[in-house]
Amino acid sequence: MPPAKPSPSKAQRDSKSKLNQLTSILLVLPLLLFYEVGVLFADVMNGADFVTQGLLRLVGMKGFIAIQAFIVVVFLGIALYLRRNQKFEMKLFLPVLLESGVYALTMGTFILFVMTDLLGIDPRLAAGGSVASASSFDKLVLSVGAGVYEELVFRLILLGGLIMLFDRALKLKRWLAILIAFAISSILFSAAHHIGPLGEPLRFGVFVYRIMAGLFFAALYQFRSFPIAVYTHALYDIYVLVLG
């Protein structure tokens, strides 16, 4: 009877359950490229697209194009660097897409249940203004852009940075560091949609809804993967803005 194989360690199990960095970058790259090309032809922006509107106001169209090209070069440079020690797992694209689709179709219902049935808050989510009257193409571009850039800013950079700050620098317990980082990043995520001349009017129900959406995306980023958070966000916005 052959000896039993040792069970994998927790670190090994965790590494198998999450995408490697190279796969994460390359799975997100097509959405980034679509948005960066599409936004040049889109006729509408809104508060959700605050990254693009801020850059355009600051550096103009030529500067914006240069920055977008630089971002693509950075993504490709990181991918080439990671390729030395990691393998791109293309076979994971379909599972990521399907899992994200399930989350995108269910998160709205779940959040509405929590808000209306548990908290007694009326979300009033009807989109208005320039977004409601935009073309399907413009809405598609905005949806993909929100999925990529908002997850990049609020989850990968802000949430990841806050967890590192509270966990490693301030030496808080891991669960507490994650909890505080979730709360701060989600509140800022919701607030960003109401900032600037293209921001939406502040309504309590919508503000709370987006905080909860931020918590949902944060959980996907932290416990699943960055691409799943990006695709879920993009697919949810497509479902609400384009197909809704």
Image (cartoon, rainbow, N blue to C red):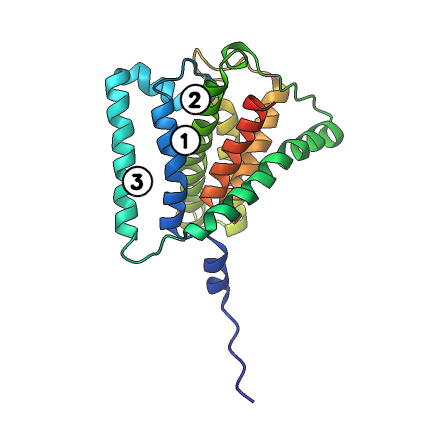
Crowding at label 1, few (<14), some or many (≥20) Cα neighbours within 10 Å? many
Q: Name which of mark 2 and mark 1 comes first in the sequence.
A: 2
Tell which residue pokes out farthest to the right in this image. Answer: 117
* Position in image of residue 164 (x %, y %): 41, 46
Q: Where 227 sits versus 204, above or below?
A: below
User: Which residue carries the number 2 mark?
Assistant: 49
Q: Gap between marks 2 and 3, in whole Å?
A: 20 Å
Look at the numbered disc 1 and give the secondary structure of its residue. helix
Q: In this rendering, does residue 177 appear at all? A: no
Q: Position of residue 233 (x, y in %)?
A: 51, 33
Residue 225: x, y in percent?
A: 48, 46
Say if mark 2 contacts mark 3, CB within 8 Å.
no
Disc 3 target residue: 75
Residue 24 visible here? yes
Q: Earlier in the sequence, mark 2 or mark 3?
A: 2
Q: Which mark is residue 149?
A: 1
Q: Is 29 located above or below residue 83 in the figure?
A: above
Q: CA distance from mark 2 to mark 1?
A: 8 Å
Q: What amino acid is at disc 3?
A: Phe
Q: Residue at x 30, y 47 (%)?
A: 79
**3D distance between C-alphas at marks 3 and 1:** 13 Å
Left or right side of 160 for 95: right
Q: Quadrant of residue 236?
A: top right
Q: Quadrant of residue 43?
A: top left
Mark 2, secondary structure of its residue? helix
Residue 241: mark: none
Front-most of 240 and 197?
A: 240
Element type at marker 3? helix
In the rendered image, residue 108, in percent from the top left (x then y), is placed at: 63, 31
> Which residue type does callout 2 highlight?
Asp
**Could you tell me which residue is drawn at 26 percent across and 48 percent down?**
80
